[in-house]
Image: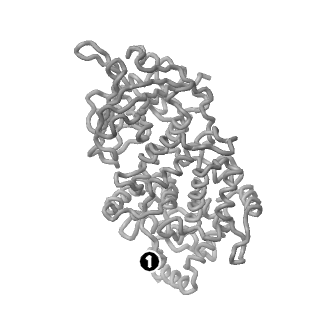
Amino acid sequence: MGDEDWTQDKINAWLAQGALTPEHILSRLDKSIEGSYALEEDEKQYLHSVFASASTPASSGIGQVLTESAFISLLQAKAALPRCSAGVEAGRTVYETLGYLSMLPFPRGNSQSQSRPDGLSLAQIKRALVWALPDRWRHIIEQGNLSRMRTEHDRQRLLFQSLATSTTPSSVQDEARTRARSIARRHAFDVPEMFSDFSVVNNDEDGDEIYHDLLDVLYSTQEVKHISLSPVPRNSFRSVAKQIKAHEQIPELHTLAIPAQRFENLAKVLLALQTEALKEEAIVQLSQFDDAARAVCAAFTQEDGFITWPSFSHALENSAPHLLDPLYRLLSLALLGKDSPFDVLEAPEAPSNVPEGSILTLPRASQLVSILAETFDAGSLQRTAHYATPHFPTPSTFTQAIQNVPDEAIVLFSGRAISATSTQDGELCIFGLFSPAPKKDGDHIQATTEIDPDNAGQQSCALFQLDPVQDVFRGVIGAAGWNLVADTEGRESVVFGLSGDLKGGVVLALRDGLRRAEIRHMGKGVDEDSEVGKDGDGAEGVAYKANPRRGDWALEFGVEAIEIWSEPKE
């Protein structure tokens, strides 16, 4: 009997027994969670205790469930979820996310249909936590030569799916599908080199990433009667996975979209919880985070007003890599009794000494944490210089002030647009510079290994934007971070980037005695797949990398204030 014969015979037998129905597959997934370290023993005990105290009998009379209102109360009591209406709305969104994740690998078209009206059972909550929190799925999904290697990028995609309650307009679905395939190819091998031979692109002619999630679970939950017997290989489940997908009406990834307003509402609360500032406050007005949340949401949103998987993935990877950290901390605090789950940083303290009228307000500090959480301590920041129009220093005095800070330099430029191709005249603009080695980055942007080799999350010099769109423009190692440039009449300007930048670069110039800022962004035609990572290697002819999703644009704004922040040297 050939390999295909015995595997198909097994699959046919399971089908005849009803072993491949969603109910039986989810039941085996539950057993796998209980028999593994996906949830530690102390976490299970805490969760059981919380569930016992907060759950109520299901209306069906079978078992206990955690209702939406009880879950939100838990987040408020144990994880500092703001008690205002915006906080409650975010709590509902998180609850819907858990409902969606609890049903994987059998998702429906949107997350709101996933949470049963009755509530979530203890088993559902455990499933959802294993899919939501970093590194947990490794304990329930088998990986190796008969399967494939999953990545953290897969987990982030599941969170996108759980938030996607809308359908992508048909006019852009083909583009979304093409870009999703490109993302799958790019991230399939984001695994330790020793496991690269087991990597498989999870988007092919048989199906997309959601289909491949089903394959992963079918393979990992199959019944193996003895450890010495070979399991049915993952690829052998392809045909039956297609049948299950059709029968269960499982959607395709390129059809899913997050409504921008839904995401902006959630982002507002996530920004508020980036730092410890709100920990002791029972009721918080979140309106101060409106502008920051709108800028963050703009980074995730396509021109058509929807957030698709490609736009979500790009922004989470490049513009706000730590935005979701508070979500993980909320779940961990409320349900597992731990401040922060594995591989997620604890929330830093907010800047404690912020002079009135500063550019770096609490919402702007939260934006910076969502970008640079691993690289600086927000609670230790001190303002070392502040300049307001018309009292600006000379360009050379200003650049010297950047180099004179005790540690890293965070420089902020704030003003109003006066000429732009990307925004409206009079709109608030906030740009900045992050330089972890300001005494050296001006001449040559330093590699992360030269700055702090022991910090895996260390980032190199970069330009960033906080308003009207949050974005980051990574520096290229070895390029000059900034220069003093004199015109034909001897007037100096400060230029961040190379004046003759080629395609793919960003330049920010401060002219007219620092009173006028000019930004040129040249991302049109840049291959998104060729993007550099955090260290920005290999970008010849540019100093700061453009965002290929934003094309070409130029902006000029009148500078109203400039600030420099740093941490005191230990």
Q: Amino acid at mark 1?
A: Ala
Is 34 situated left or right of 449 in this image? right
Number of numbered discs visible in the structure rendering: 1
The outermost residue toward the bottom is: 16
Look at the numbered disc 1 and give the secondary structure of its residue: helix
Above or below, 184 against 22 in this view is above
Q: Give the x, y percent position of residue 128.
A: 60, 62
Is residue 81 visible from the viewing direction of this image?
no
Q: Residue at x 77, y 60 (%)?
A: 49
Specify the farthest residue to the left.
488
* Closest to the observer, 20 or 338: 338
Left or right: 394 in relation to 498: right
Measured from the top left, where is residue 531 in percent x and y? 36, 44
Q: Position of residue 239 (x, y in %)?
A: 43, 77
Please report the residue visible at 69 percent of the width from the left and 54 percent of the height from the top. 336
- Where on the picture, by quarter, is residue 242? bottom left
| Residue 533 quadrant | top left
Choose between 194 and 76: the one closer to the eye: 76
Whether residue 335 is situated above or below residue 488 in the rendered picture: below
Colour convention: one colour
Q: Is residue 239 left or right of residue 73?
A: left
Residue at x 56% of width, y 76% of height: 22
Q: Residues within 10 Å of mark 1 (few under 14, many from 20)?
A: few
Q: Which residue is mark 1?
A: 246
Nearest the viewer among 3 and 345 is 345
Query: Looking at the image, can residue 158 be seen?
Result: yes
